[in-house]
């Protein structure tokens, strides 16, 4: 009996903030080399080619991991994540399940990077808050000590939390609302210091709160 071959490494590919030209060359190579692509319906529609099997990731992480396990024993698998794999993505459960030695992580341009680039401010010391899939657990009082805050929106109740944060920060901060970055409908709005962020917001929204002197 011929033993099963060792599973192939899983490529975890950061696909950038949205526009296909923000996908790196290394990411393109990994996607082209894979027989099976795993990711959101939007990412698969954008990057999958004819002949590549597709596993659509919705909200069932356990089922997605089980499908990766089944496929990886025979085929090269690439997991597509938006932005960068290190920031609020499917990469974390994949790495936890299969281990770092079994995965190759390919970085991408995150929406947070794109948001700070849009206003020409560095993000080295930024506080990053995830409000995309659930309401954040971040302490609003603690955030008031930071001069750069990026909130990843998208959750249906995120706007109310963002409004509360803005009210606590007050007019010492300038809110910047970045929607659909790098996409044709991109919109970046720099509001007056202390202004309240108004909805509705696109599902791909980053809200920055910047100490107002940073934009002067």
Image (cartoon, rainbow, N blue to C red):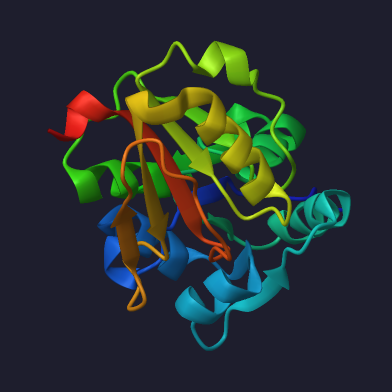
Q: Which is nearer the eye, 110 or 135? A: 135
Say above or below: 85 vs 141.
below
Expressed as whole percent of the image width and height from the top left, the position of residue 112 reads 39, 42
Q: Which is nearer the eye, 94 or 154? A: 154
Q: Is 48 situated left or right of 108 in this image? A: right
Q: Which residue: 37% across, 56% down?
A: 27
Say above or below: 165 vs 182.
above
* Residue 2, visible in the rendered structure: no
Q: Is 102 situated left or right of 204 in this image? A: right
Q: Which is nearer the eye, 162 or 151? A: 162
- Quarter of the figure with residue 117: top left
Say above or below: 32 vs 12.
below
Expressed as whole percent of the image width and height from the top left, the position of residue 215 reads 18, 35
Q: How many marks?
A: 0
Q: Which residue: 64% across, 74% down?
A: 41
Q: Which residue: 27% across, 59% down?
A: 25
Q: Which residue: 63% across, 63% down?
A: 39
Position of the C terminus, as image quadrant, is top left
Expressed as whole percent of the image width and height from the top left, the position of residue 141 reads 59, 14
* Residue 133, visible in the rendered structure: yes
Expressed as whole percent of the image width and height from the top left, the position of residue 100 reads 59, 29
Residue lying furthest bottom: 50
């Amino acid at each position: 009996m011929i033993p099963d071959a060792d599973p192939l490494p899983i490529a975890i590919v950061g696909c950038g903030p949205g526009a296909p030209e923000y996908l790196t060359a290394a990411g393109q190579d990994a996607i082209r080399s894979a027989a099976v692509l795993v990711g959101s319906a939007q990412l698969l529609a954008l990057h999958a080619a004819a002949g590549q099997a597709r596993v659509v990731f919705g909200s069932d992480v356990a089922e997605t991991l089980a499908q990766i396990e089944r496929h990886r024993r025979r085929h090269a698998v690439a997991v597509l994540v938006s932005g960068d794999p290190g920031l609020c993505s499917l990469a974390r459960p994949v790495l936890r399940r299969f281990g770092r030695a079994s995965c190759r992580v390919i970085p991408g341009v995150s929406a947070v990077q794109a948001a700070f680039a849009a206003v020409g401010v560095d993000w080295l010391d930024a506080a990053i808050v995830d409000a995309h899939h659930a309401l954040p657990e971040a302490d609003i009082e603690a955030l008031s000590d930071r001069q750069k805050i990026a909130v990843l929106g998208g959750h249906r109740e995120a706007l109310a939390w963002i409004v509360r944060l803005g009210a606590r920060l007050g007019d010492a901060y300038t809110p910047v609302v970045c929607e659909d970055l790098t996409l044709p409908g991109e919109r970046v709005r720099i509001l007056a210091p202390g202004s309240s962020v108004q909805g509705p917001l696109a599902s791909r929204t980053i809200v920055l709160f910047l100490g107002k002197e940073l934009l002067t």
